[in-house]
Image: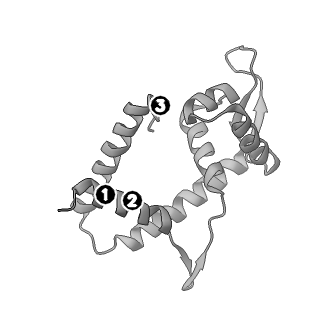
Amino acid sequence: MVRATQEVEYEQMLLSRHGLLHHRNGRREDSRLERSAYILLSRIRVQGPMSIGELSDAFGLDASTLNRQTAAAKRAGLVERIPDPDGGMARKFRITDEGARMLDDERERNTSSLDQIMSDWSEEDVSAFAAYLRRFNADIERLSGRRWPRP
């Protein structure tokens, strides 16, 4: 007998394989933002300016990884370094207008893809799925000790 958690594991593996399918005029398009930049910008948007140390704590990644990711985002014009608005010593990263525009565009493309994928789902089914995903993520966050703020 297959345990339900084995089914969840398998479906989660497939989900990570698919990603979201962006289509325009019947042709697949790649994301405009790399996954790491999308997640980085999303976190900074919801939490506000963050230092390397705060990002490291938030993501559970070492500072060298975050230094590479923020450097790439800075080169792309997605974030900028600013003095700590609260007067602290560490400089922080703030999302730029271009970063906010690209994040909004990517989020809209993702939402449009989800609208296509779930076009035959009832509103109740979509809401239930969202609630289960929120619960699943909240339990991962609880176990990891790294809560992700929600808007």
Q: Residues within 10 Å of mark 3 (few under 14, many from 20)?
A: some
Give the residue pinned by disc 3: 146
Give the residue pinned by disc 2: 12
Instruction: Report the label total.
Output: 3
Q: Secondary structure at mark 2?
A: helix
**Residue visible at 66% across and 63% down in the picture:** 32
Rendered location of residue 58, percent (x, y)? 55, 32
Q: Is residue 84 above or below residue 25?
A: above
Residue 44 seen from this side: yes
**Residue visible at 38% across and 43% down in the picture:** 137
Q: In which image quadrant can residue 55 be found?
A: top right
Which label was assigned to residue 8? Answer: 1
Name the quadrant of the C terminus.
top left
Q: Earlier along the polypeptide chain: callout 2 or callout 3? A: 2
Q: Is residue 26 above or below residue 12?
A: below
Q: Is residue 42 above or below residue 82?
A: below
Q: Residues within 10 Å of mark 2 (few under 14, many from 20)?
A: few
Dot 2 and dot 3 residues touching (CB under 8 Å) = no
Name the quadrant of the N terminus.
bottom left
Dot 1 and dot 2 residues touching (CB under 8 Å) = yes
Residue 51 seen from this side: no
